[in-house]
Amino acid sequence: MNKMNKKNPLTHSLRTINFAIFLLLTHAIVSSIKATTYTEVTDELGINFSHQDGRTGEYQFTETAGSGVGWLDYNSDGNIDLLIVNGISNNNKIYKNNGTSFTDVTEILLPERNTGKGMGICSADINQDGWVDFLITNYGNDFLYLNNKGKNFVRRNLDPQPQPYQWSTSCSFADLDNDGDLDLYVVRYAKFLLDSNKACQLDNAIGYCNPSAYEGQNDGLYINDGKANFTEVSKDRGIYIGTKDRGYGVIISDIDHDDDMDIYVANDGTQNRLYVNNGKGFFTDNGLYSGTAINQNGTPESSMGIAISDIDRDGFQDLFITHYSMETNTIYQNYGEGNFSDMTHLFGLNQSSYMSMGWGTAFADINNNGFDDLIVANGHIHDFIKKTDARQTYGQLNQIFLNQKGKKLVLQKPNESFALPSKKSSRGLAIADWNNDGKTDLAINNIVDKFEIFKNTDKNTNNWIGIKLIGNKINTSAVGAVVTLKNGEFSQRKEILSGTSFMSHSDLRIIFGLGNTKQPVEISIKWPDGKISSHSIKKHNQYHTLKYPSQT
């Protein structure tokens, strides 16, 4: 017998083991590729934007905030367009969505530009003409931009005589006095003058002072006369007046399910406010009573951004708040009737959010399995932080937490979340389905860095249904509507909200993930004026436009 053809058992076993290892490695690589949720596509979409704030090394306090980003369909063509806020005058940008690419149309649409340090954006149809308008908040004057039928925007001052140190951050439109039209809440931060900036000694470096070095500013509650003329009435309506609050985030939602819109405000370093509406646009701060003002240790935190979702599908909207590093982000679970409990530890977020500094945030069912997942944009304020604390970095990884059937939120590994994870100091975050494929995409505004769009490239084949609402003549954007989906196995509840996250505004359309469900679903809509409409939807994996009952 030829010895060369004779099989060696040891060699054969080693080859078998090596082949098995090869298969395992190959499977791991393929699994890793399949698990990647988001891929950055900014350049290929034709978007060329880098955030600026005019910094000169003097550590002007306004530089810490960065700027937001907004999605809005300004020309009503079904493609969600993009507005990016910048931290210097005359440099906000609007990009038209062509379906597969974007075009800079700023010069055409904004003949009157923004003259302040740009901070945030919120959007809705505020003058009842069927076209979405928007507000830009600034350090300086805040500007309303009224849509001229998709041709351009006409700028209008929100405040005829703003204070010289006025510093507005997040904003939200909603019907606060139940008269049908959309009112406005503007969050304000600190009393800060550029020519009296303070730089503080922080360990072995000079940097931005603690926010407590500055008095807080009063927020603004504005009532709409129906023609986009707004009157500030916060003092008479129960909103806190004083110098304690330095506000960053706001959500307006019917938090206690009593058919009016309540206001939740995230404050930096002091208690958060939950303004409960009496049904006529007058408010009582129930933050402490509700359990949403402070954390489970009884401590106010440095609150930044806000997201809201029924993450456990019990019919009540839960709150998520981002915070400064070494504080943890916080989940307040809603038990009904306006009662919440800090369940951060229960949902597994203590360790995963402790070292990061969170800003923009959103809930979205990114894999369309029927449970909303969580997205957080992170980044420190001090560019030298690594030198003073080796555990921390200025640029930080953004995070995605997958919802485990309403019981936990599990942090994905960086290379499973983003194809090429990178560390930046991110601020504004907004979600939208810009390519109308039923998968939620991201826009992130990074401070003094390249702006980014992330396409959802998750390989799941789950079904979905998209909902676009057209409201009545007074509130065509249907802001405040509650949409409930039922398919026999479970129900999901979502709201149409303006201006969420951190100084940002997301797509007003809703996506319901259905998992592998193929059966028809029932949609119930509670419109902002209380009317109820029911809709049976048989076709999945597409958008459905549903109109206010009188228009059907």
Image (cartoon, rainbow, N blue to C red):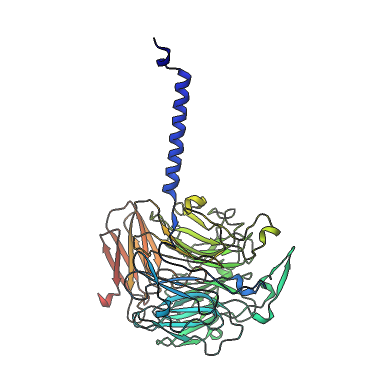
Q: Quadrant of residue 229?
A: bottom left
Task: State which quarter of the image contains the N terminus.
Answer: top left
The residue lying toward the viewer, choosing from 386 and 226, is 386
Pinpoint residue 417: horizontal percent, then vertical percent: 48, 53
The residue lying toward the viewer, choosing from 139 and 11, is 11
Pinpoint residue 409: horizontal percent, then vertical percent: 50, 54
Pinpoint residue 86: horizontal percent, then vertical percent: 52, 74
Visible residue check, residue 170 = no
The residue lying toward the viewer, choosing from 519 and 491, is 519
Q: Going by the image, does 268 lie left or right of 439?
A: right
Q: Is residue 422 above or below residue 167?
A: above
Q: Residue at x 68, y 55 (%)?
A: 390
Q: Residue at x 67, y 62 (%)?
A: 384
Visible residue check, residue 187 = yes
Considering every residue shown, the one lying at the far top of the view is: 1
Task: State which quarter of the image contains the C terminus.
Answer: bottom left
Q: Residue at x 50, y 81 (%)?
A: 114
The residue lying toward the viewer, choosing from 252 and 279, is 252
Q: Going by the image, does 492 lie left or right of 62?
A: left
Q: Is residue 21 above or below residue 398?
A: above
Considering every residue shown, the one lying at the far bottom of the view is: 160
Q: Is residue 363 above or below residue 287?
A: above
Pinpoint residue 185: horizontal percent, then vertical percent: 50, 79
Q: Quadrant of residue 196?
A: bottom right
